[in-house]
Amino acid sequence: MSEPDDIEVARDAYAQVQPLYTRLASEIRDILEVKLAAARLTPVSLTFRTKTPDSFVAKIGRKKYRNPLSQMIDLAGVRVVSAYESELAKITEIIEAVFDVQDRIDKARDLGVDRMGYNGKAYVVRLGARYAGGRYEGITDINCEIQVRTVLQDAWAIINHQLVYKNEESTPERLRRDLNNVASLLEIAQGIFDSVREKRNAYVSEIQLKENDQSAFLAQPLDFDTVMAYTRWKFPDLDASVNLTQMLLKDIDLKTYPTLQKLDAVVDHARAAVAAYQKENPDWFKTGTDFLTKSLGFVDPKFRAKHGFATRTRAAFDKFQNLIAR
């Protein structure tokens, strides 16, 4: 299909069905969002798009399609970007379970070991018969491409696209080596990120195992993971705040509090004063971290001076100071 009249006919035909592809991509994105959340997967981004008529026509010219509406698999597209490569298998399992997979595309495999690029995987899917009802009318039997990538794979794709090199043959030879090196470094970096994540998960598991041995648990040094675990351990009916824990660690003197035992002593000393302030101002005690930071505020003048306490809380430090255990 190359004649101008034929191209315009194809453009008009696509313009008429483009709303269907937009609905399809939106539905698939929403389904994935729910399923990923249920699996406790939080993607860095989850987006959808449909090919514009101009892009549709341009691809006809590049690929020489005879029947573009049936031959193009990416008129509707969804992209799932994950931080870690180890999560991609779980994402794939969900895609395979909830959609009718028409095709699987492994771009890294297709490139081979000596070709330029660093790409993720893609799946051509349909909603299929399991999705019935008015909202799915007209979109159950058309294709949507789901791209699954890590952040670094996505970065490579974005940069490579901006350089306008669609394939290795179109890339100037003097740049090919540099781009290959970048792709290799990104792949190595991804492996390191995944390794660090595995080590951190193992560390968190080790912290949790020590919770049954109070002495061993409280002997641990202060860091983000130990303080989060301590807060949940000390205040089991409350959540631990990520943001407040990060602020606490920024403001606390780790030389004064080398272990959780030192922190635990502060909480015990401030118990009566914190309880009195909580009774007066209960809305400011929503998380275990609220109790922890206010305990430090009552007992430790240096932490109190550095931390961003509200005026009302600073007044409470003076008002209930007599309740601090000595």
Image (cartoon, rainbow, N blue to C red):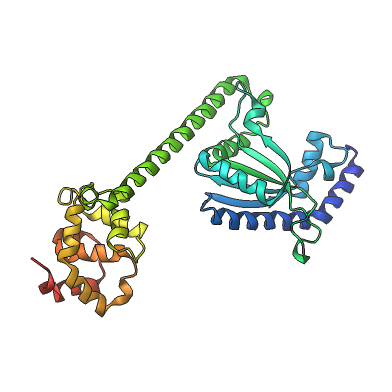
Q: x%, y% of residue 53?
A: 78, 49
Tell me the quadrant of the picture where the N terminus can be found.
Answer: top right
* Front-lying residue, 57 or 102: 102
The answer to whether 296 appears left or right of 208 in the picture is left
Give whichever of 144, 238 is nearer the camera. 238
Judge from the rendering whether residue 16 lies leftward or rightward of residue 94; answer left or right. right
- In the depicted structure, whether residue 6 falls above or below residue 289: above
Relative side of 307 to 186, left or right: left
Q: Residue at x 81, y 58 (%)?
A: 138
Image point (14%, 62%), residue name: 301
Location of residue 188 with respect to 263 vertically, above or below: above
Instruction: From this view, report whether residue 109 is shown above or below residue 57.
Output: above
Residue 100: x and y in percent read: 73, 48
- Foreground of the two, 87 or 30: 87
> Which x, y percent locates residue 202?
37, 41
Quadrant of the rendered image containing residue 322: bottom left
Q: Residue furthest front?
A: 212
Residue 186 in percent (x, y) is at 50, 32
Number of numbered discs overlaid on the protein picture? 0
Dividing the picture into quadrants, the one containing residue 248 is bottom left
Residue that appears at 29% across and 52% down: 211
In the picture, the quarter occupied by the C terminus is: bottom left
In this view, the residue farthest toward the left is: 326
Taking the view exactly as shown, the residue that stands out farthest to the bottom is 280
